[in-house]
Image (cartoon, rainbow, N blue to C red):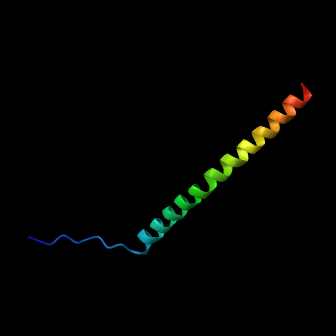
Protein backbone atom coordinates (compact mmCIF):
# COMPACT_ATOMS: atom_id res chain seq x y z
CA UNK A 1 0.00 0.00 0.00
CA UNK A 2 1.29 3.43 -0.88
CA UNK A 3 1.17 6.34 1.48
CA UNK A 4 -1.11 9.19 0.60
CA UNK A 5 0.63 12.49 0.13
CA UNK A 6 -0.59 15.18 2.46
CA UNK A 7 -1.29 18.40 0.62
CA UNK A 8 1.01 21.13 1.87
CA UNK A 9 -0.14 24.67 2.43
CA UNK A 10 1.85 26.57 -0.12
CA UNK A 11 2.16 30.32 -0.62
CA UNK A 12 -0.91 30.40 -2.88
CA UNK A 13 -3.08 29.00 -0.08
CA UNK A 14 -1.63 31.49 2.40
CA UNK A 15 -2.27 34.36 0.00
CA UNK A 16 -5.86 33.25 -0.47
CA UNK A 17 -6.37 32.98 3.28
CA UNK A 18 -4.85 36.42 3.85
CA UNK A 19 -7.12 37.93 1.18
CA UNK A 20 -10.17 36.30 2.78
CA UNK A 21 -9.25 37.62 6.24
CA UNK A 22 -8.64 41.10 4.83
CA UNK A 23 -12.05 41.09 3.14
CA UNK A 24 -13.74 39.91 6.35
CA UNK A 25 -12.09 42.76 8.28
CA UNK A 26 -13.04 45.27 5.61
CA UNK A 27 -16.68 44.15 5.76
CA UNK A 28 -16.77 44.42 9.54
CA UNK A 29 -15.54 48.01 9.31
CA UNK A 30 -17.37 49.17 6.20
CA UNK A 31 -20.88 47.85 6.75
CA UNK A 32 -21.52 49.80 10.00
CA UNK A 33 -19.91 52.89 8.45
CA UNK A 34 -22.14 52.68 5.38
CA UNK A 35 -25.25 52.02 7.47
CA UNK A 36 -24.53 55.17 9.49
CA UNK A 37 -23.97 57.15 6.29
CA UNK A 38 -27.25 55.90 4.80
CA UNK A 39 -29.16 56.79 7.98
CA UNK A 40 -27.63 60.28 7.93
CA UNK A 41 -28.61 60.83 4.30
CA UNK A 42 -32.13 59.52 4.88
CA UNK A 43 -32.53 61.96 7.78
CA UNK A 44 -31.41 64.84 5.54
CA UNK A 45 -33.90 63.78 2.87
CA UNK A 46 -36.67 63.65 5.48
CA UNK A 47 -35.74 67.15 6.68
CA UNK A 48 -35.86 68.56 3.16
CA UNK A 49 -39.16 66.82 2.45
CA UNK A 50 -40.85 68.08 5.62
CA UNK A 51 -39.41 71.59 5.15
CA UNK A 52 -41.07 72.05 1.77
CA UNK A 53 -44.47 70.63 2.71
- Would you say 15 lies left or right of 34 here? left
Tell me which residue sits at (38%, 74%) in the image: 10
Front one among 14 and 44? 44
Quick one: which residue is furthest to the right in this view?
A: 52
Q: Quadrant of the N terminus?
A: bottom left
Q: Tell me if residue 3 comes above or below residue 39 in the rendering.
A: below
Front one among 2 and 17? 17
- Would you say 14 lies left or right of 3 here? right
Tell me which residue sits at (41%, 69%) in the image: 13
Quick one: which residue is furthest to the left in this view?
A: 1
Count of all numbered marks drawn on residues in the image: 0
Percent x, y of residue 5:
22, 72
Front one among 27 and 18? 27
Q: Tell me if residue 35 comes above or below residue 10 in the rendering.
A: above
Question: Which quadrant of the figure has residue 3?
Answer: bottom left
Q: Quadrant of the C terminus?
A: top right
Percent x, y of residue 34:
67, 49
Tell me which residue sits at (90%, 31%) in the image: 51
Tell me which residue sits at (45%, 66%) in the image: 17
Front one among 11 and 32? 32
Question: Which quadrant of the figure has residue 40?
Answer: top right
- Would you say 36 lies left or right of 4 here? right
Amino acid sequence: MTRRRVRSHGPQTLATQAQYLLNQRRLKLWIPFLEAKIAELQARIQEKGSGQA
